[in-house]
Image (cartoon, rainbow, N blue to C red):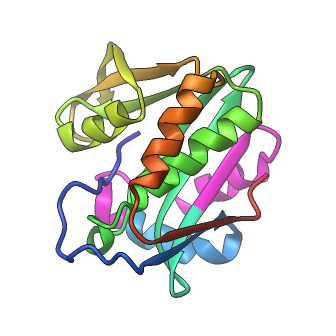
Amino acid sequence: MTVATDISSNHSETPELEVFVTAMRRRHLRSVLRIEGQVYPRPWTLGLFLSELAIRQSRVYIVARVAGTVVGYGGLMVLADDGHVSTLAVDPRWQGHKVATRLLLTLARTSIARGCHALTLEVRVGNTAAQALYRHFGFVPAGIRKGYYAETNEDALVMWAHDIDLEEYGRRLDAIEAAIPGITIVEGIA
């Protein structure tokens, strides 16, 4: 799992920005695959996304859209009472608009709604920008997976956020949301 983050920007922040976060559908996959190919050395295939979308009981995939265009997406796997962020990516042209923050916020709240007590993910050891985003959400390093990213021979940093079902974590999410400029409209995510 890697992330294209919001840290650098080619755009100035637009407070009026309206971002819609909705459930990923088959019709979004062309745009998702375009972004996937831009941000990952070994992109997921159409077949992999289709198989993940078919597992509705334990998977949640979402997209962020601006003016009808998919600008980012994220995925979540729920296993017992843990949520695993399986993917998170933002179109490089839209980095700097808090798209990854909006997506991760939605995935965290969805995890809580599905009864999760903790969230986990893997991130490239060298992707310090993504790690900063995750730390903002309360993730802490828990270990290293050697050679996890075979295509680049990079290690993965395993990170966890515990006690996400507690009131304190809910306040953290509320503060993160309050700091996002513009409007985020979340619809159709179960």
Q: Report x, y in % for residue 23.
A: 69, 62
Q: Report x, y in % for residue 189.
A: 74, 57
Residue for point 41% across, 62% down:
99
48 is within the stretch colored magenta: yes
Q: Is residue 183 left or right of residue 100?
A: right
Disc tally is 0
38 is within the stretch colored magenta: yes
**134 is higher (above) or lower (below) than 145:** below
Q: Report x, y in % for residue 102.
A: 48, 56
Find the residue positioned furthest to the top: 143
Quadrant of the image occupied by residue 108: top right
Say if residue 44 shows up in the picture: no
**45 is higher (above) or lower (below) than 20:** above
**120 is higher (above) or lower (below) than 8:** above
Residue for point 70% across, 68% down:
25
Q: Please tell me which residue lies in front, 186 or 26.
A: 186
Q: Please tell me which residue lies in front, 71 or 12.
A: 12
Q: Please tell me which residue lies in front, 136 or 47.
A: 136
Q: Is residue 160 left or right of residue 114?
A: left
Quadrant of the image occupied by residue 30: bottom right
Residue for point 22% across, 31% down:
154
Q: Report x, y in % for residue 76.
A: 61, 41
Residue for point 53% across, 68% down:
64
Q: Is residue 117 left or right of residue 34?
A: right
Say if residue 110 shows up in the picture: yes
Work out which quarter of the rendered image holds the N terminus and state it.
top left
Q: Give the range drawn in magenta.
A: 37-62
Find the residue positioned furthest to the right: 57
